[in-house]
Image: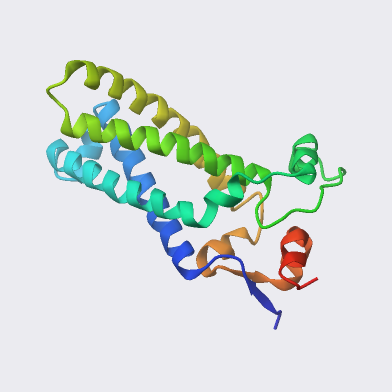
Amino acid sequence: MAEMVRKSSVDEVLNHWILAGSCILLMITGFAFLFQMKSVGSVFGGFNIMKEVHNWGGVVFSLSLLYSMRHYLKDAFEYDADDAQWFKVAGGYLSHKVKVPPMGKYNPGQKLYYLGIVGAGIAIAVSGFAIWLMKDNASVMLISHLVHNVAFCVFVIAVPVHIYLSTLANPGTFQIMVTGMLPLSEAKKKYPKWMKAAGKM
């Protein structure tokens, strides 16, 4: 049996699924509100109940996003020469012939994606709470709806790309999101700088 190494802690894996689940729920209900899709609303027992689900789902999403910062935020702000080279070769996604530089625990694409999600997540959360709790302020409502919809567009584009890159485009990655573990040999191949820092190279 292959020797395994832990890449994600148990609470990291659990919080990732809470964040993902609440995000997808919010995207579905938000899409239904935006286009007045009664068929989706009926699944929740009507728009009024769906609104409550959306609002409290937003609370769960916001708390989960804040908690995720303890796992990823520090790494997301750290870049080096290898990260710059990674961008030059597009991480090897466009061609298998290019040489991809050695990576740490997260590649720069993952770091930027996370920062984008944090930025859009904070924007959509703050504007969402404003829409929920400040209905009597017309100016706040106008700005909040604009910010909310722009941030929503970011999620609609970024999340499906993230799902594709973390499953079909990178076989074996999904295992990390379920168990937090991956084979040591795979870790040495994909994340040599992380393995070296951990004393496993």
Q: In which quarter of the image is residue 18?
A: bottom left
Find residue 187 and report its horizontal and vertical position in percent: 72, 65
Q: Is residue 66 depicted above or below 153 in this figure?
A: below
Q: Is residue 29 depicted above or below 136 in this figure?
A: below
Observer able to see residue 124: yes
Find residue 40 and report its horizontal and vertical position in percent: 25, 39
Q: Is residue 10 depicted above or below 132 in this figure?
A: below
Q: Nearer the viewer, residue 149 or 75?
A: 75
Q: In which quarter of the image is residue 85?
A: top right
Count of all numbered marks drawn on residues in the image? 0
Residue appearing at x 79%, y 45% in the figure = 82
Q: In which quarter of the image is the N terminus?
A: bottom right
Q: Which of 188 and 196 is in front in this view?
A: 196
Residue appearing at x 61%, y 66% in the figure = 7
Q: Quadrant of the C terminus?
A: bottom right
Give the color scheme: rainbow, by chain, secondary structure or one colour. Answer: rainbow
Residue appearing at x 72%, y 72% in the figure = 184
Most distant residue in the bottom direction: 1
Find residue 145 and report its horizontal and vertical position in percent: 29, 23
Observer able to see residue 93: no
Q: Which of 44 and 189 is in front in this view?
A: 189
Find residue 37 and report its horizontal and vertical position in percent: 25, 31
Residue appearing at x 62%, y 51% in the figure = 168
Relative to 113, 24 lies left or right? left
Relative to 82, 32 lies left or right? left
Relative to 27, 154 lies left or right? right
